[in-house]
Image: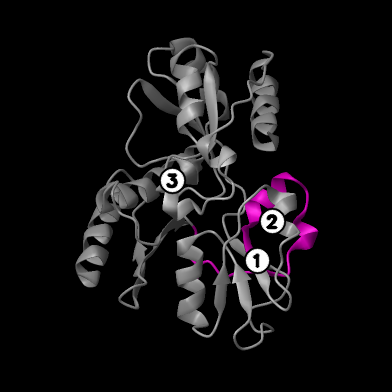
Amino acid sequence: MAQSTAVARALSAATGRGVELVEVATTGDLRADVPLHSMGGIGVFVKEVQRAVLDGRADLAAHSAKDLPSAPAEGLTIAAFCARRDPRDALIGATLADLADGATVASGSVRRRAQLARVRPDLHFAELRGNIDTRLSKIPAGGAIVMAVAALQILDMTDRITEVLPLDQFVPAVGQGCVAIECRSDDTATRDALAAIDDPATRHAVEVERAFLAELGSGCSLPVGGHVTADRLYTFLADPDAGVSIGDEIELGGGAADLEVAAAAARSARSALA
């Protein structure tokens, strides 16, 4: 709701038009006791919101870009990528260096667990679901939880952060920190209005990241990270069962060719894990 409210305010400020919020409960919201990876992860926070736009209950859908499947939804288009907030992950409760041997870190993200385990193989992990306040109440004794800095920024709660994790070692999820706005593909008026809050630099970065994810395939259930910053694409792919992870830093040119560079990086990472 905080995210959607911020989008509504930005759109109103840019266009002078009023925006009404339509609240929708998603599968991810309703099944907060179930680990995301056991529900398939991708799409559990977006499908019902997309349906509300497709059936006319709403004109646009606001999503965390990292929740969107890499394949576009039929009948919808991403008309705006809002300017990105801080894309990094953060620890709350203790710094990585201060966590005792065998300490517990709570996170529902297989990517975050794999990245932490690569740096601190002694750590134990616990599930973490729920809204921000619920998660902040579940910091393990002597341990920490992992959250996106952007989620805390939008709620003005960054004072809770103990340590921001370095982006090159802890590659964020594809699209992390960005709000993506979908509308019906044939709704020209709404597409034109959303152009006012589309951030070109963020759009290019997230589209390159999504090209990396798309090349891995919609059925990929492995821990994946992909992030573009300046002229670099940082990637991460792991197979926890095999105890193998791949991280890379790839130079980009800043144009449309970056999409193929990202796809090639995905093929290379997948081959390295095979």
As shown in the figure, which amino acid type bears the numbered disc 1?
Answer: Ile
Total numbered labels: 3
Left or right? Give the position of 31 relative to 47.
right
What element does badge 1 sit on?
strand
Question: Which percent across, then down, holds residue 41?
Answer: 44, 48
Q: Quadrant of the C terminus?
A: bottom left
**Looking at the rendered structure, which numbered label has been put on residue 135?**
2
Give the residue drawn at x 53%, y 41%: 28
Can see residue 169? no
Give the residue drawn at x 35%, y 29%: 73
Question: Which percent across, then down, holds residue 175?
Answer: 48, 47
Q: In this picture, which residue range is highlighted in magenta? A: 146-172
As shown in the figure, which amino acid type bears the numbered disc 3?
Answer: Val
What element does badge 3 sit on?
helix
Pointer 2 with pointer 1, Cβ within 8 A:
yes
Question: Which percent across, then down, holds residue 232?
Answer: 41, 61
Mark 2 closeness class: few <14, some 14–19, many ≥20 residues within 10 Å: some
Q: Quadrant of the N terminus?
A: top right
Query: How much space separates mark 3 and mark 2, taking CA atoms?
Result: 27 Å
Residue in front for this viewpoint, 108 or 10 = 108
What element does badge 2 sit on?
helix
- Find out whether residue 155 is within the magenta segment: yes
Which is in the foreground here, disc 1 or disc 3? 1
What residue does disc 1 label? 145
Left or right? Give the position of 62 relative to 191.
right
Query: How much space separates mark 1 and mark 3, taking CA atoms?
Result: 26 Å
What residue does disc 3 label? 206
Q: Can you say whether 165 is above or below 71 in the image? A: below
As shown in the figure, which amino acid type bears the numbered disc 2?
Answer: Arg
Give the residue drawn at x 32%, y 52%: 212
